[in-house]
Image: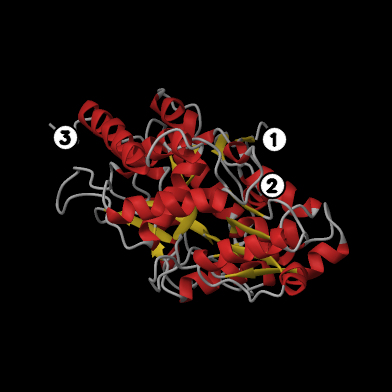
Amino acid sequence: MNHKTTIAVAGALALAGGAAQACEIGADVSILGNDFGPIHAIVDRASACTGAEVEANLTTEHRDIQVAALTASPAQYSVAIVANSSIVPLLNDDLIRPLDDLVAKHGQSIGKGQLITVGGKVMAVAFMANAQHLFYRADILEAAGVEVPTTYEDVVAAAKAIEDAGIMEDPFALNTATGWNLGEEFVNMYLGHGGTFFEPGSAAVSINNEQGVATLEMLKALTEYSKPDFLTFDSNATTALWESGSLALATMWGSRGAPILDDEGSTEAIVASTVLAAAPSVGGNDTPATTLWWDGWTIAKNLSDEAAEAAFIAMTHGIDPAILEENNDLAVWLLDGYRPAPAAAGVSASAQAGAKPYPMVPYMGLLHTAAGNELSQFLQGQESAEQALADIEAAYTTAAKEQGFLN
């Protein structure tokens, strides 16, 4: 394998069946995806196929290069590993192919709940669920004399109590790196406040409102208990901070649970006191302020039928339930035989508490991008919440007009 390591549900755990099968492919397969443990495990299994080569580029920059890579003819990658949001640009530009025929021919081990259907056609195969939720240090909370937070107002109060007691400075973090990460935090918190992003039946944005202001004020209150470089915090950064013992409370992806709870990168005391819980609610609402995601794979349209069939066979082998034998605890798998592990507790609790799926409307990505790019000045105290929201709406509207969603 040439593994180039340049390297986020609603619904029940899917039912699938069948033992692992030998994998023989008739054409080379190239995979583009994100850089984290479950995807590495899938690529490793897919690469065991014989008859042709399987290559992968697993990188945190995959969203930025996938459209150009699949626009080429033939496509630069035969497989794109995607999630709720990153599949949308590929759908909008008609760059991925329906998989119904391949599912019928080679997909006997794939559960019906794994099939992502758009417009009546199977466009992706999901393999894991994900969501951002609360991680907390039970020993630190006990030392500060505070209860486990169930709301973001509680999180702010707990962080203040920890600082006031002199136990830890800057005890909280969430993924607030300018760009996609910050945009995701806006989406989660805005939905938690009960907001709606667009005017009914329209792509016209509508976030400069009471819920929008409350969202920004809560994000600012939280970052006031984060380290000064919080605008650089992505998942790798917040995970490293947690494992170093620098945090008592954090909002992180469920997919970070397994590496945080394993025996590498941290101390036994930190791991033993780390607890994963549902995402907090906010603003007096009951719904967790997070979104449910699926991760899955798609196959490029600009590809020969032979290459597409090889890609489908390799990826189906990659997500065969046999992967659970050595990787059960690595993710919240949507595979038959998955046994929920401690690392899945936060995602499961958030789903059970009614967390909403991430919106999949075609123009949501434009709003997500605008929010991620326009909130930094507000969080640094350089403009008002109302001005930041107006900036987001203006950036979104310009982009939506350029792409034909608005006149």
Sequence-earlier tag: 2 or 1: 1
Sequence-earlier tag: 3 or 1: 1
> Which disc is residue 36 wearing?
none
Q: How far across and down, in percent of the image, does residue 205 sit?
A: 23, 43
> Which disc is residue 44 wearing?
2
Check disc 3: other Cα within 10 Å, few if <14, some if 14-19, many if 20+.
some
Q: Residue at coordinates 32% horizontally, 56% vertically from top-left?
A: 211
Q: Residue at coordinates 55% horizontally, 53% vertically from top-left?
A: 222
Q: Residue at coordinates 83% horizontally, 55% vertically from top-left?
A: 266
Disc 1 target residue:
3
C-beta proximity under 8 Å, tags 2 and 1: yes
Disc 3 target residue:
406
Q: In the rendered view, does 141 fall on the left or right side of 196?
A: right
Disc 1 marks which amino acid?
Answer: His
Question: In terms of secondary structure, where does tag 3 sit?
Answer: loop
Asked whether residue 170 appears in the rendered view, the answer is: yes
Disc 3 marks which amino acid?
Answer: Leu
Q: In the rendered view, does 36 fall on the left or right side of 347?
A: right
| Comparing labels 3 and 2, the label whose residue is closer to the camera | 3
* For residue 140, above or below residue 171: below
Q: Residue at coordinates 64% horizontally, 37% vertically from top-left?
A: 229
Count of numbered labels shown in the rendering: 3
* For residue 233, above or below residue 276: above
Q: In the image shown, does 237 or 220 lie closer to the viewer? A: 220
